[in-house]
Amino acid sequence: MKHVIIVLLAVLFVGPLHAQNIEKSKLKVLYVAQNPDLPDGYSFGGNVKLWESLKKDRPQDFYQFFQKYFKTVKMVYGEDYKEEMSDKYDVTVFDALIPQTDGKMTKRWYMRSAPDYFSEDYDAASVMIAGVGGAMLWNKKTKIDWLCNCLYSHAFNFDKKHPIFNKPYKVGLTMEMQKHKGGVFKYYSGKDAPKEALMWRVQNVDHMEGYPPGIVANPGFGDSPDAEIVSGGPCIKSIKATSLGRHGNFFQWGYRASPMHLTEEGKLALINTIHYMAQFKGQKPFVKSVVHHRLTALDQVYKASDKGYEDQIKLTKHIANQVNAAKVRKMAGKSLSSDKYMLNRSMELPDRTQFLSEVPQEVIEEHMDNWNAYLKYYEDNLGYLGLSEPKEKYGSTYQDVVIDKDLQKIGIANNDLQLLEKCISMFESNEQTELAQKLLKKYTTKSFATAKEWRKWFKKNKEKLFFTETGGYKWMVNILK
């Protein structure tokens, strides 16, 4: 019995003993907090009254939490932050919007014409909490974009050996079975996903109805050497979306919870993330995220297939139920902050042909209403997916992901290094010179006039070349090597 008591006491005191043995780091941390008396300035969803109550304690919760692990911690409200403050610290944690480069606080972060939040010189190691990252980096063209403000409490598809799970604290990563959110199944990448999977719990807020969600970034996050995907997370968008990830000196911590509502393992992972990011001070992203991953084209034609369209019908009915619920809450005077968005949603059934808008006419002529054939055609030509000519929409320029007929003529995928070798050889032997030059210029960032120049560049940089889709479907030179 004596031995049993000793073992039980050891188990009971694991937490306190760990806390007592924390060796505070010398890293200097600047915490940019949300002023509880001011509006957040970006869409966060959830129950307004609940959030207003929770955010009163949020600044001190984060501040006191960081003080347990770091000797030097400074807290400043977002409206009082100045860029030069970060120069004095190893890592800056942003949990609030800051003045834009014109010196003003604004809600115009989602407008392409809005001023940036950071200057071009900003290179401080930064951890962006939830939607703050998507908002502040919206116009910065980083991989940390605003795909969806819909991240729940877990994480999946991560490397347990990554430093944020191991240094300086070992994170237990307790796994549990969780259902994927229904939205993932309407995407090509999620069409065959299991209904549930083993996931790691990051935060304990599922029991709190109306707790605002976190943020995820678009697929393709890690397709350049200045970026890395650390984890995916359950959301209503693509199963390939990123919840934890780094692009240059910026880290997206997609989860919304303050330390009060993080799991013990989630707390340690956040502290480890701050330690991890300190090494990236001064390393700005060098690949701009300018277009979508090729999965977006597959997503579109998948929605035209029998299974994909059925999912679209289910989604429309689900949205209709949410809109009706929002209307009832409005009538009862109990609206949520997200209801304003829902009340503007369309409940009309989608036109199946709208998902074929970028499919070549000759392909439509061949397959007509054989809806499943379009997805197979795109799957068979996956390596030939490139960008359309620039188009104007809603006051900005964009490009769709389409089949590149020139690539089909060559028969080599654009993400295969052999394409450059083949085109340079064609140029050297005067074989379809115009086509070779066109493809070389299209799929690199160079525009040399002679075959000799192309060969010299290729020979010098061959071992450093990488292909990025989000960076514009280009072969680029890795400047980090």
Image (spheres, rainbow, N blue to C red):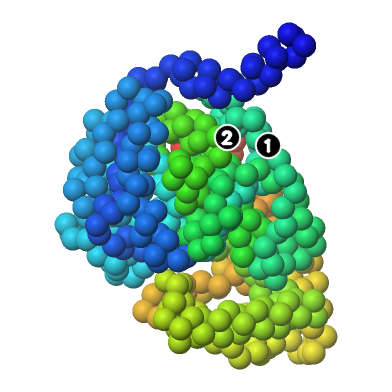
Mark 2 is on which residue type? Glu
Mark 1 is on which residue type? Thr
Pinpoint residue 357: horizontal percent, then vertical percent.
62, 84
Q: In the picture provided, is 13 more to the left or to the right than 449?
A: right
Mark 1 lies on residue: 174
Pinpoint residue 416: horizontal percent, then vertical percent.
68, 51
Please report the residue visible at 36 percent of the width from the left and 25 percent of the height from the top.
70
Evaluate whether residue 441 shows in this view.
no
Give 376 or 461, whichever is nearer the viewer. 376
Q: Is residue 162 depicted above or below 341 in this figure?
A: above
Q: Secondary structure at mark 2?
A: helix
Pinpoint residue 82: horizontal percent, then vertical percent.
20, 45
Please report the residue visible at 75 percent of the width from the left and 49 percent of the height from the top.
177
Give the crowd class for mark 2: few <14, some 14-19, many >=20 residues within 10 Å.
some
Q: Is residue 299 depicted above or below 464 in this figure?
A: below
Please report the residue visible at 35 percent of the width from the left and 34 percent of the height from the top.
64
Q: In the picture provided, is 220 more to the left or to the right than 26?
A: right
Give the crowd class for mark 1: few <14, some 14-19, many >=20 residues within 10 Å.
few
Give 320 or 130, whichever is nearer the viewer. 320
| Res. 21 mark | none
In the rendered image, the residue lying farthest to the front is: 1
In the rendered image, the residue lying farthest to the left is: 103
Q: Marks 2 and 1, how far apart in space?
A: 8 Å
Give 250 or 434, whichever is nearer the viewer. 250
Label 2 close to label 1 by CB (< 8 Å): yes
Q: Earlier in the sequence, mark 2 or mark 1?
A: 1
Please report the residue visible at 24 percent of the width from the left and 30 percent of the height from the top.
88
Residue 125, picture quadrant: top left
